[in-house]
Image: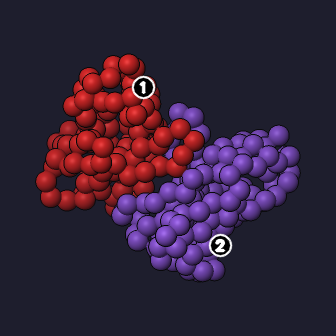
Chain colours: A purple, B red
Amino acid sequence: NAGVTQTPKFQVLKTGQSMTLQCAQDMNHEYMSWYRQDPGMGLRLIHYSVGAGITDQGEVPNGYNVSRSTTEDFPLRLLSAAPSQTSVYFCASSYASYNEQFFGPGTRLTVL
Amino acid sequence: AQSVTQLDSQVPVFEEAPVELRCNYSSSVSVYLFWYVQYPNQGLQLLLKYLSGSTLVKGINGFEAEFNKSQTSFHLRKPSVHISDTAEYFCAVSSMDSSYKLIFGSGTRLLVRP
């Protein structure tokens, strides 16, 4: 099993550009989530999904969109990148929100 | 709202010494508790979890944690640390208060010195 995979590993954007961070899992997990990690702030939940076709907002959803058309994939879209979105982004999956979450390796995003 | 507090942002310790990383949470209901470890430039990996049952939980790499409901704490301990334990450690809580979403603390950087 590959577990949770994320692409790209690194990305540099200019303010106003859009992009999609990819996340995929091969463990047949229903629950998937996106977090951002900033120094001294731990991980904050951006969006999550409890199954295909169902998504909801987390703690810091502004400026991000998600969709879940399949169980395996959960992409995160930045609509118009801002410097405040410079961060490390982690995707995670689990059987349920209160179970152990398996994390991907992360995407380091810099917005200039 | 649910919150998790890790009071120590950094804990320096000498190799083979014991260590305790502190975690306190706010919740009035039953909780699920987790400790994750993040090695440099990697994702998070589960160290241990408390879902129910025995309040002393053993995890990987010789770590253990004790759930104390009266003090709303879930401190992480290891009797003898190694250089390879140098990493960032995150406490996380899930409960009905957060609609079972995982809430993370701000992290504690464990720095093991020779």
* Above/below status of A43 relative to B40: below
* Above/below status of A31 relative to A80: below
Q: Amino acid at mark 1?
A: Leu
The answer, for residue B22, to whether it is visible in the render is: yes
SS at mark 1?
A: strand
Is A107 displayed left or right of A43 in the figure? right
Residue that lies at the very extreme toward the left in this rendered image: B54
Is B12 displayed left or right of A65 in the figure? left
Q: Amino acid at mark 2?
A: Ser
In front here: A104 or A83? A104
The answer, for residue A47, to whether it is visible in the render is: no
SS at mark 2?
A: loop
* Above/below status of B74 relative to A21: above
The label number, if any, that marks residue A67 in the structure image = 2
Q: Neighbour class for label 2 at 10 Å: few (<14), some, many (≥20)?
A: some
Instruction: Name the subunit of mark 1.
Output: B
Read off the residue under disc 1. Answer: B111
In front here: A11 or B101? A11
Give the residue drawn at x 75%, y 43%.
A110
